[in-house]
Image (cartoon, rainbow, N blue to C red):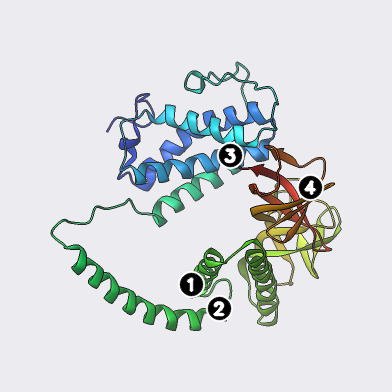
Amino acid sequence: MADLASDPNQSLHDILGLGAAKLGALHDRYYPEVYQFAYYRLHDAQLAEEVTHTVFLELLNEAKQTSGSQRNLRGWLMSCVSKRVNEQLIPNRPALVDDGVTSFQAPQEEMVIDQEAQELSRQKFLAAAKRRPYRKTISPAIGRPHFRLVLGILAIILLIGATITLVASDSALPGDRLYPFKHAWEELQLFLAGGLSQRLEIEKSYDQNRFDEVQSLLQAHREATLSLVGGLSQMNPDEWLVGDLLVVISPNTRLIGQIEPGWYLLVEGELQPDGTILAHQVQPREYTISGKLQRIQEQQWLVDGVTIQVPPEAIVMGTPKIGKQIQGKAYRSLDDNLVARWVKVEP
């Protein structure tokens, strides 16, 4: 395969089978251009970073689902980022760059790329590539009935082993060997949830689990890398009160989005010997909204039985109508209201 750093004619097929080093090089080569396109359309650094990261994850899915294709890699990336940017734009907002994205040229002035954001995107990109191996074709020598029988036997074996593991992992804490199994089980339960109301209740219970885990770590006098969800009630220059836990904000703490008291936050950091949490990254806790729009009132929508506040500053894409499917993201206030950040009404 041609050198990743120099070949302008790479195709999706070229990324199949690449190791971590070459995938990382591919990400780093195209990240600045994809991010720059998103930023000059959105004028929002955080949103541009989110869109750029989503594009690279979709690249993996595209390559795996099609087993690669000869379509130009750069052209696919720019086409994808254009679609994702358009989803974020307010209807009728004038485009800043022509839709001919494959010929997009970066502005003459140099843009400063947040290296931490790029590195975080790179790590998640490589982690996703490792988690999702490329799709393999079932050998025609294995008949469908026999293949189903083999799958059934394997499923029973895996179910027995998984049940034992999950029971053992229920009390696992951050840093424990079985903790990833606990998270995997939670993700499965969330995936199987019926509607928006049930999903939100499950997510809130998981948020409480993360908070309870920190309390257990404190009682055991353990240090650990952790994620915490809690309500922000006080903000001092270098110390915040999240729930009843003291979170230390250092010059190296990465703050994402608009953060102010009265909202739930997602904190990633280290539990210190003195019981404080040294924050690595802090951002508002986002919840996914997805369901049928049942009622529209002033600044308030009912979606699958769940009330969503839609303030004037929320980005609304499409025309809201009763019966339409919507999706979006919302923040959660300390009084347990969900407030939309953006919503998209399906055509």
For discs 3 and 2, the disc positioned in front in the rendered view: 3
Residue placed at 81% from the left, 55% from the top? 238
Residue 291 in view (yes/no):
yes
Kind of residue sitting beneath label 4: Val
Marks 4/3: CA–CA distance: 22 Å
Using the image, determine if residue 203 lies above or below residue 83: below
User: Pointer 4: what residue?
Assistant: 310
Q: Are the residues flagged by discs 4 and 3 in contact, CB closer than 8 Å? A: no
Marks 4/1: CA–CA distance: 36 Å
User: Pointer 3: what residue?
Assistant: 51
Kind of residue sitting beneath label 3: Val
Q: Which of the image's four quarters has the C terminus?
A: top right
Q: Are the residues flagged by discs 1 and 2 in contact, CB closer than 8 Å? A: yes
Residue 113 in view (yes/no):
no
Kind of residue sitting beneath label 1: Phe
Marks 4/2: CA–CA distance: 38 Å
